[in-house]
Amino acid sequence: GYVLGRYLAKHAPTQRLYVIGEANLVSELRTNGLTVVDELLAQDEKAVIEPTGIDAVVVSFDRTLDYRKLNTAYQALIGGAKLYATNGDLTCPMPGGAIPDAGATLAALQVLTGRSPDVLAGKPSTLTVEVVMELMQLPAQRCLMVGDRLETDIQMGMQAGMQTCAVLSGVSKAADVDKLAQRPDLVLNHIGELPAQIC
């Protein structure tokens, strides 16, 4: 939410946002001076939302997702609202196993509307790299991207010109790394192995 909040505050500060996401995202957006609107449709309403009520739908991880939220987002989108997403991850790893993430909700809305997101802020988006580089005030070549998702973390690092380190303690496994045309600079079993590689 941090990257998208900064981006929207800079590029769309007056848009009214409908959020499929949790309280921390709403708080982050409001901290950036953005307007977050409440749900407008009852569960069984089919009427299109007044286009002036919602300028954009923001999709993120939401463990309280229900039909009303999905329908409100859908109606706003077919009414012309922009579509923004914090990330495209289909699943989120949890101690008990993977659960649906923002990408699953985004995929449902994409199928319903036939639209791609206007802004996808999460990895491997260049938006994330731009915000990180601005905050760190370092060139990408001096940075090491460490991550457990090859298709997001490592891809973003490579696109940005960073060195990359895949850790196999999360989503991606050794077999996934073996399938890559371009391998990460480092492949470690877990983050604890990193100090020995950089010292």
Image (cartoon, rainbow, N blue to C red):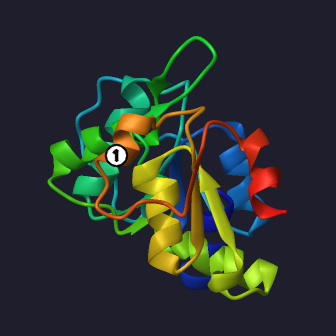
59 is higher (above) or lower (below) than 3: above
- Left or right of 178, for residue 69: right
Q: Residue, x 48% and y 22% (percent of image)?
A: 99
Quarter of the picture holding the C terminus: bottom right
Quarter of the picture holding the N terminus: bottom right
Q: Residue, x 79% and y 79% (percent of image)?
A: 136
Q: Measured from the top left, where is residue 191 in percent x and y?
A: 72, 43
60 is higher (above) or lower (below) than 52: above
**Looking at the rendering, which quadrant does residue 142 occupy?**
bottom right
- Left or right of 182, for residue 145: right
Q: Residue, x 24% and y 41% (percent of image)?
A: 47
Residue 119 shows in this picture: yes
Q: Measured from the top left, where is residue 183 in percent x and y?
A: 41, 60
In what element is the residue under mark 1?
Answer: helix
71 is higher (above) or lower (below) than 95: below
Q: Residue, x 50% and y 64% (percent of image)?
A: 121
To which residue does mark 1 refer? 178
**Looking at the rendering, which quadrant does residue 28 occupy?**
bottom right
* Callout 1 crowding tier (Cα within 10 Å): few <14, some 14–19, many ≥20: few
**Looking at the rendering, which quadrant does residue 8 occupy?**
bottom right
Q: Measured from the top left, where is residue 162 in percent x and y?
A: 58, 75
- Left or right of 190, for residue 152: left
Q: Nearer the viewer, residue 47 or 73?
A: 73
Q: Nearer the viewer, residue 168 or 60?
A: 168
Residue 124 shows in this picture: no
Q: Amino acid at mark 1?
A: Asp
179 is higher (above) or lower (below) than 28: above
Q: Nearer the viewer, residue 91 or 63?
A: 91
